[in-house]
Image (cartoon, rainbow, N blue to C red):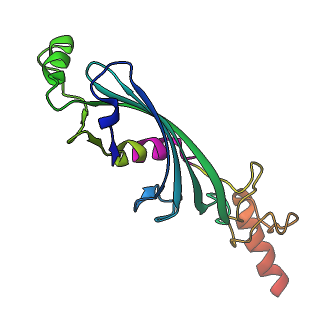
Amino acid sequence: MFDTRELGRRPGAMKKVSRSVPAPEDLGIEVIGVPAGVTVELDLRLESVMEGVLVTGTARAPLRGECVRCLEPVERELDADFQEMFSYPDADTRTARRDEAGDDAEEEDVFYLEADLLGLEPVLRDAVVLALPMQPVCRDDCPGLCAECGVRLADEPDHHHEVTDIRWAALKDFQDENQEK
C-alpha cells in the first residue's frame, strides 16, 4: 500500500517514490514468471488530479522460466511500464463514465483509494503479465528438440533419423522381407 496523504487533494501535486517489494504469488504464466518473494523494484510517480491520483511507474524484476523449444531454463530481467488512475472514493466516476459511453456500456475496472492508500498489486500483476514474452526462448535461433527422440538439437546439430517417405513405405517393407530370405 502506498500513502497519498502528502499529495492532499491539490491537483498538480506530485510525489516520486522508489520502493522494493516482494513479488506476490503466481506472477506470470505457465512457462515464465517472476518467482514469488523475489525483490521487485518500483519507481513511481504519484500525481494528484481532480478525480484522484494518477500513478505512473516502472517495475523491474527477475524472470525465470523455460524455453518453449528445448525446455532449458531461461532467466531474464523484466521492465514493465504502467499507468493507472486511482479515484477518490467520493468521486462519481461511475455516473460520468456511463453518461459518456451510454447506459448499456459495461463498467470498466475502476480503482479507488482506500483511506488515502492505494494498492498496486492488481495493476502490477496486469503490467507484468502483459509484458512477459508469451513464447520465451533460450536464444533466438534455438533449434528445439528432436521430434522423434527428444534430443536437444543445440547439443547435437548433426542429429538426424533415417526416415522413409510414407509413399515408399510399402516398398521398404517388401525389400526388408526379400532380404531376410
Residue appearing at x 27%, y 18% in the figure: 50
Please determine whether, in this image, residue 162 is positioned above or below residue 46.
below
Where's the C terminus, which quadrant? bottom right
Please determine whether, in this image, residue 87 is positioned above or below residue 42.
above
- Closest to the observer: 82 or 161? 82
Residue appearing at x 75%, y 56% in the figure: 143
Magenta part mainly helix, strand or loop? helix
Would residue 126 be counted in the magenta stretch? yes
Residue appearing at x 74%, y 68% in the figure: 152
Report x, y in % for residue 17: 48, 40
Please determine whether, in this image, residue 34 is positioned above or below residue 149.
above
Report x, y in % for residue 4: 32, 37
Residue 5, image quadrant? top left
Residue appearing at x 74%, y 71% in the figure: 151
**Left or right of 62, for residue 122:** left
- Closest to the observer: 162 or 49? 49
Residue 117, image quadrant? top left
Q: Looking at this rendering, what residue extends furthest in the right direction? A: 158
Would residue 57 be counted in the magenta stretch? no
Report x, y in % for residue 52: 28, 26
Report x, y in % for residue 105: 18, 21
**Magenta part of the chain:** 125-134
**Left or right of 23, for residue 76:** right
